[in-house]
Image: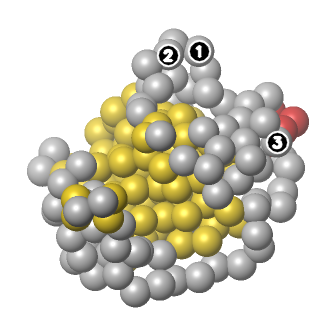
């Protein structure tokens, strides 16, 4: 079952208290992903937890830095965030566990909104009415596809495509 980008006007963010919960870590890497004779070249996120996860992505585009979200990825499913051959070397990811409030974060600050969004620019998030979150950087090495596996298990792993 493939998750799709949420088309809801409900805020995705869990309650503020839940955002402080810790214990989730990101297991990341890129892997070749194929489905019965069909090769895919995409940026995918797979949710290895037992909870719904909201995901946002950041990347460099012609118009500048762009962040997009939210993809709602149900437990044990995957979502394609970027379809087709990847055009950039670096991508940035932020995710939240809807039930437990845990987050997968990094050190690169980018803008997000509560509802579905596509934001150009990463400066002055608060002044523009957005929130600022720390995204994790992924160096794809200019590979055509990349997959990130979200997991409850502590630690980070990187794998070859």
The image quadrant of residue 87 is bottom left
Pointer 2 residue: 8
Residue 32 appears anywhere in the view: yes
Question: Dot 3: what SS?
Answer: loop
Find out whether the residues at labels 1 and 2 contact each other: C-beta distance under 8 Å.
yes
- Which label's residue is closer to the chain start, 2 or 3? 2
Placement of 48 over or under 52, stated as above or below: below
What's the residue at 43%, 60% (across, down)? 92
Other-residue count near label 1 (Cα within 10 Å), few / some / many at <14 / 14–19 / ≥20: few
What's the residue at 36%, 47% (across, down)? 81
Other-residue count near label 3 (Cα within 10 Å), few / some / many at <14 / 14–19 / ≥20: many
Pointer 3 residue: 100
Question: Dot 2: what SS?
Answer: loop
* Residue found farthest to the bottom: 160
From the viewer's side, name the closer residue of 61 and 72: 72
Q: How is the image coloured?
A: secondary structure
**Quarter of the image containing the C terminus?**
bottom left
Give me the disc on residue 69: none
From the viewer's side, name the closer residue of 19 and 158: 158
**Whole-Å distance between the Cαs marked 3 and 1?**
18 Å
From the viewer's side, name the closer residue of 148 and 90: 148
- Which label's residue is closer to the chain start, 3 or 1? 1
Pointer 1 residue: 10
Question: Dot 1: what SS?
Answer: loop
**Whole-Å distance between the Cαs marked 1 and 2?**
5 Å
């Amino acid at each position: 079952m493939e998750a799709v980008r949420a088309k809801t006007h409900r805020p995705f963010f869990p309650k503020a208290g839940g955002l402080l919960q810790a214990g989730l870590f990101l297991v990341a890497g890129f892997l070749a992903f194929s489905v019965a004779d069909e090769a895919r070249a995409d940026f995918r996120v797979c949710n290895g937890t037992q909870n719904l996860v909201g995901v946002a992505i950041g990347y460099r585009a012609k118009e500048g830095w762009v962040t997009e979200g939210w993809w709602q990825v149900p437990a044990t499913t995957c979502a394609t965030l970027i379809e087709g051959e990847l055009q950039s070397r670096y991508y940035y990811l932020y995710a939240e566990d809807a039930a437990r409030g845990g987050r997968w974060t990094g050190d690169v600050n980018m803008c997000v909104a509560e509802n579905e969004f596509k934001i150009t620019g990463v400066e002055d998030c608060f002044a523009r009415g957005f929130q600022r979150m720390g995204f994790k950087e992924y160096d794809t090495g200019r590979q055509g596809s990349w997959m990130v596996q979200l997991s409850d298990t502590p630690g980070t792993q990187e794998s070859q495509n």
